[in-house]
Amino acid sequence: MDFRFTDDQRAVADKVRAFVADEVTPHADRHDADGRFPPEFFSALSGAGLFALSVPAEYGGAGHDAVTVGVALEELARGEAAACHPVLNAALIGSIIAANGDDDQRAAWLPKIASGEAVVALCLTEPERGTDAARIGLAARPDGGGWRLEGTKTSIMIGGYATHGLVFARTGDDGARGITAFFTELPDSHVKRTVLDDLGHRAGRRATLEFDALPVGPENVVGGLGEGFVGVMRGFDYSRALMALEAIGSASAGVDAALEYARERTAFGAAIGTYQGVAFPLVEHVTKLRAARLLAYEALWRKDQGLDHRAEANMAKNWAPRVAVEALHQALLTFGHYGWSTDNPVTRRLRDGVGLEIADGTANATALVVARTLLGREAAP
Ligand SMILES: Cc1cc2nc3c(=O)[nH]c(=O)nc-3n(C[C@H](O)[C@H](O)[C@H](O)COP(=O)(O)OP(=O)(O)OC[C@H]3O[C@@H](n4cnc5c(N)ncnc54)[C@H](O)[C@@H]3O)c2cc1C
């Protein structure tokens, strides 16, 4: 057992921390208020190598292991949780294509994802189907040797910016084995976007995408026909552990700010941190954040070892956003009336934290997965 990160992992953490201090934290509240990242922010993420994290080196990426990607995302989230989404999408979709794509697909798409030329979105949720993802209905209608994608996806993070999407569509019968994953461009000529007005992650430009007969061919199919749900979606265990670290990074920065405030703010002639009623709740939340962090890194470490990490990743995603929201609530209260102003980044962090309780599967959805590993499918909810 060794709880230290490797030298390489520490070097990545240092590099991202410096980037966040210069390029993310100073702009995070502005991104949130504007509800968008300026184009130069994507260039900055690209320049910092953040789109390349998971992409294999032979395709222009950094080829980092999962733990290292987690380290980078945790640091990025300390500046701005919303900034994690384009990076997390690139890591998830890049690793899905690396694992499930053929040589031509890897050569065509991975360098573009690594450089940030392709800004990618994961297009699964539909207006009628979220948790019940095996029953999505966006149609892939046969057309010549290919298909036309027809229907609506919604709640697509980075949907307002994405040049490409991994789109889950129905090529077969009603069940899970009738779903195929297509990686495709999202041209305005066939995809209408409506950006949603959100409570948090506002710069992430979550959007509804209406597909109007978007042509796709066999070259767009990732992982084989009918493999979208049963094969390709297995990558979601990875993103769930990463999203847990997004929640933890953002919440830890919020709690650190509250601890700093507790050292400086005085009431009744002493720093408020000297009162147990202020200090002990913060201790409790720091403890829980630390425990949730270990769980998330264990999931990523297991992935890197080639071990089953499904239960750990889903436990982490189940727990971390809840722990983060509770910690940020306490952090906000620690600031008293200064915590109630939108000038205080803790308010943005709290709103973002709630979004992470829903994104990529709610606590019930992740608990279902864990219950099935603990009880067996027949005896679980
Ligand atoms: C910030 C954010 C980012 C997102 N990003 C993306 C993205 O990039 N791409 C994408 O495709 N989607 C994205 N989503 C959508 C997200 O994945 C879904 O919202 C989520 O999976 C839940 O689906 P739903 O909203 O349709 O809720 P529903 O499935 O309708 O569920 C509603 C409620 O019922 C509960 N519930 C449902 N079924 C069960 C059950 N069997 N047992 C117990 N409880 C149940 C749920 O937990 C939830 O509380 C994002 C959402 C948010 C908020």
Image (spheres, rainbow, N blue to C red):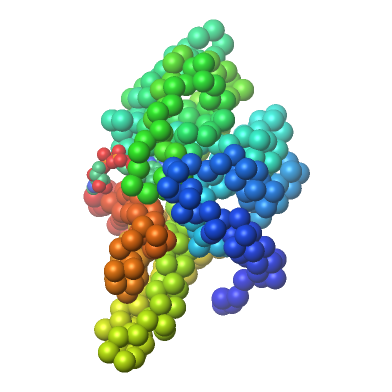
| Residue at x 39% of width, y 60% of height | 343
| Residue at x 32% of width, y 37% of height | 130
Task: Please provide percent x and percent y for residue 278.
Answer: 30, 82
Q: Would residue 109 be found to the left or right of residue 290 on screen?
A: right
Task: Please provide percent x and percent y for residue 308.
Answer: 49, 56
| Residue at x 30% of width, y 85% of height | 267
Q: Would residue 143 be found to the left or right of residue 52 on screen?
A: left
The quarter of the displayed image where residue 244 is located: bottom left
- Locate the N terminus and report the quarter of the image it occupies: bottom right
Residue at the top extreme, as displayed: 144
Is residue 230 in view from this perspective?
no
Give the vertical position of 220 relative to 282 (above or below): above
Give the vertical position of 369 relative to 115 (above or below): below
Depth order, front residue of 30/318: 30
Task: Please provide percent x and percent y for residue 364.
Answer: 28, 51
Give the vertical position of 363 relative to 256 (above or below): above
The quarter of the displayed image where residue 178 is located: top left
Task: Please count the marks in the image.
Answer: 0
Task: Please provide percent x and percent y for residue 186.
Answer: 53, 25
Ligand 1 picture quarter:
top left
The quarter of the displayed image where residue 268 is located: bottom left
| Residue at x 30% of width, y 78% of height | 281
Depth order, front residue of 150/179: 150
Is residue 141 in view from this perspective?
yes
Residue at the bottom extreme, as displayed: 269
